[in-house]
Image: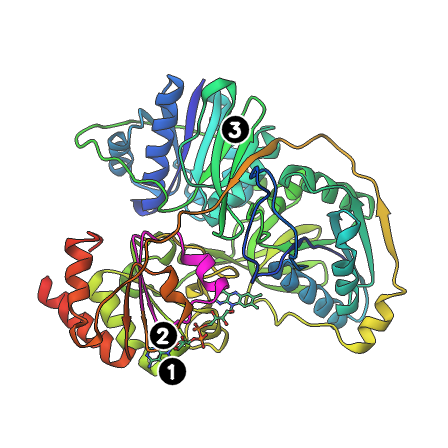
């Protein structure tokens, strides 16, 4: 019995959310008195995979099949299922990402496993039960879920657990083949288009986020948001009406019907704080609200606030960050 | 083309979430239920594709008890042709997926659409489970869906970009914005919805694989610390020295 961790890679690097997942998996393995093995997907680099030892992984399986570079649902599912059988893994841990959720749900049927997505804490394994806490009601609540059955799959919410770093530890990287055939790649993408990310920081993985709402008045003013984001090393986000009218792209829309994020720092500029918006961001560790209306509901959900005009306040904040650095 | 659109019945997005005193169940008292907002993309896009093709049917499917029927009727008013309700409490994603897979197979549906996830359970699981149970491809989450004959071209969101995926029917897709502009019912739709067929069938399959032991609410914020706009720069010092997040 072991714990199998699915590690997503891009451009040779292990994604930040997968470092978190690796740490999570290693801690679950320790709880259960076993070891954690990783299976790499995406474009991986062996030296970086070996470094997963720092997160507590002992062994990394890597299939160098070039068509695994892009996400292919069937091929990834078969690859991970094969690794799980080989390692006799009772527990599979992956990121609650678009890849993790797509593969995890198929795997749960193939491996007859119970699945919990959006998991925010380590499992509780006392008195013979296996209990995980997951986010529900779009960030407005949590539910503690009992996973029955012999096999379990856990998809861990991004930024909800911290990646450990035991410097110097290395994992053994071993070649692995799931004997994938052409049929497994039938649903391969015909084209992959990457967006330009502000400063190369992906919103779902970002530790800091600067977000703008209708109070920003128009897309021509987003330079103020981007300047602060750049100074802070933050990603940019927006409220729903802002992406609905195409001031910003849809992938920046956070909230109940957009993406849910939990960065360490969320700075809301000219956003009123409607309940649907809060749902997507209220698990952020620290929330800062800048709004000219002292009655804006967002202040009730904030840690720090500035009652003021974004056009006056944002340049001051950017200048203060630059001064500090 | 036969479309099957799965809808779930969820608390309205403005709902303040509360639980029964033992924290075992969601407190439904006074809560208005709506069609899951993500499912509205699936429903509207299915209707648009049917209209564009000039033929086909759109069936809505819900796993729920009788209290979900007003929202099933709403889906019919928006433009679905008929509806099926599996008369059962939707226990978990696996259980719901089993119901959908059974009906999709029985009815030989070509395209099975649903929202990316439900805004109450937030599982983001059902699409993949259904696809795996039926042995057909899943595309999730899909931002765009076009059909030409039996071939669909979809845009699938990945972190940091998108993939263009082509699949043949039958397939499953879970939908999200900006796929279409969700429609709202018009008067004529509401009138005709009353007489459209709504079939109620019993649940099938194995029991759920997960059970909720308890719900919890997030901890309340301590209260906001206000910084005067004139000295806005002080905020940055507080974020470094006090909150330690930069
Ligand atoms: C089914 C449904 C789902 C939804 N899902 C989402 C979702 O996922 N995400 C989401 O964000 N919304 C969502 N909404 C919309 C939500 O209800 C709000 O309408 C929306 O969040 C408001 O966006 P906003 O705060 O940018 O705009 P507004 O509510 O218009 O607020 C603008 C704010 O800017 C402030 N302001 C104006 N000028 C300035 C200035 N110069 N300086 C400082 N402050 C200024 C104003 O005081 C105001 O508070 C949803 C709604 C529905 C019905």
Q: What residue lies at 30% left-to-right and 65% top-to-bottom?
A: A198
Other-residue count near label 1 (Cα within 10 Å), few / some / many at <14 / 14–19 / ≥20: some
The verdict on residue B175 being magenta is no
Residue B144: x %, y % from top left: 57, 64
The answer for which chain carries disc 1 is A
The answer for which chain carries disc 3 is A
Asked whether, in this view, residue A24 is left or right of residue B52, the answer is left
Q: What residue lies at 73% left-to-right and 67% top-to-bottom?
A: B47
Mark identifier at residue A18:
none
Q: Quadrant of ligand 1?
A: bottom left
Q: Is mark 1 within 8 Å of ligand 1?
A: yes
Q: Is mark 2 within 8 Å of ligand 1?
A: yes
Looking at the image, which residue sits at the far front? B21
The answer for which chain carries disc 2 is A
Gap in angstroms between the C-alphas marked 2 and 3: 43 Å
For disc 2, the marked residue is A270
Q: What residue lies at 14% left-to-right and 54% top-to-bottom?
A: B241
Residue B116 seen by the camera: yes
* Secondary structure found at label 1: loop
For disc 1, the marked residue is A217
Quadrant the N terminus of chain B occupies:
bottom right
The verdict on residue A268 being magenta is yes
Q: Are marks 1 and 3 in contact (CB under 8 Å)?
A: no
Corner quadrant of residue B176: bottom right
């Amino acid at each position: 019995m072991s714990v199998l961790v699915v590690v997503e890679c891009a451009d040779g690097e292990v994604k930040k959310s997968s470092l978190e997942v690796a740490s999570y998996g290693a801690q679950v393995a320790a709880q259960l008195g076993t070891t954690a093995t990783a299976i790499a997907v995406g474009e991986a680099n062996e030296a970086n995979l070996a470094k997963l030892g720092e997160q507590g992984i002992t062994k990394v399986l890597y299939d160098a099949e070039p068509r695994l570079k892009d996400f292919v649902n069937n091929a990834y599912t078969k690859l991970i299922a094969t690794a799980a059988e080989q390692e006799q893994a009772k527990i599979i841990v992956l990121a609650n990402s678009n890849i993790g959720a797509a593969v995890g749900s198929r795997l749960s049927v193939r491996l007859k496993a119970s699945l919990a997505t959006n998991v925010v804490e380590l499992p509780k394994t006392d008195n013979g039960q296996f209990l995980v806490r997951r986010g529900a009601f779009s960030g407005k609540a949590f539910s503690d879920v009992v996973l029955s059955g012999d096999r379990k799959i856990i998809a861990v919410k991004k930024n909800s657990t911290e990646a450990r770093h035991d410097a110097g530890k290395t994992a053994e990287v071993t070649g692995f083949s799931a004997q994938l055939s052409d049929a497994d790649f039938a649903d391969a993408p015909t084209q992959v288009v990457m967006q330009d990310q502000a400063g190369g920081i992906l919103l779902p993985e970002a530790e800091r986020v600067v977000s703008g709402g209708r109070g920003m008045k128009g897309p021509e003013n987003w330079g103020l948001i981007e300047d602060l984001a750049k100074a802070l090393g933050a990603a940019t986000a927006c409220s729903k009406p802002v992406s609905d009218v195409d001031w910003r792209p849809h992938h920046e829309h956070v909230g109940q019907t957009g993406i849910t994020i939990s960065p360490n720092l969320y700075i809301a500029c000219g956003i009123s704080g409607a309940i649907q918006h809060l749902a997507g961001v209220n698990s952020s560790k620290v929330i800062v609200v800048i709004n000219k209306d002292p009655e804006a509901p967002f202040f009730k959900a904030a840690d720090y606030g500035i009652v003021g005009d974004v056009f006056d306040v944002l340049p001051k904040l950017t200048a203060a960050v630059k001064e500090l650095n | 083309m036969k479309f099957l659109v799965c809808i779930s019945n969820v608390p309205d997005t403005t709902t303040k979430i509360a639980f029964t005193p033992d924290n075992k169940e969601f407190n439904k008292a006074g809560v208005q239920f709506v069609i899951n907002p993500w499912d509205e993309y699936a429903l509207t896009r299915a209707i648009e594709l049917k209209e564009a093709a000039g033929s086909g049917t759109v069936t809505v499917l819900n796993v729920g008890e009788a209290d979900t029927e007003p929202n099933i009727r709403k889906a019919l008013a928006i433009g679905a042709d008929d509806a099926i309700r599996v008369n059962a409490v939707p226990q978990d994603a696996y259980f719901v997926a089993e119901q959908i897979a059974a009906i999709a197979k029985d009815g030989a549906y070509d395209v099975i659409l649903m929202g990316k996830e439900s805004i109450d359970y937030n599982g983001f699981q059902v699409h993949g489970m259904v696809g795996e149970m039926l042995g057909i491809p899943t595309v999730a989450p899909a931002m765009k869906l076009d059909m030409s004959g039996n071939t669909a071209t979809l845009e699938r969101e990945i972190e940091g970009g998108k993939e263009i995926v082509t699949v043949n029917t039958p397939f499953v897709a879970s939908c999200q914005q900006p796929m279409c502009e969700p429609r709202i019912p018009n008067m004529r739709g509401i009138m005709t919805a009353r007489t459209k067929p709504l079939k109620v069938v019993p649940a099938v399959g194995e029991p759920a694989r997960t059970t909720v032991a308890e719900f919890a609410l997030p901890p309340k914020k301590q209260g906001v610390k206000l910084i005067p706009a004139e000295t806005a720069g002080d905020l940055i010092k507080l974020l470094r020295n006090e909150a330690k997040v930069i």
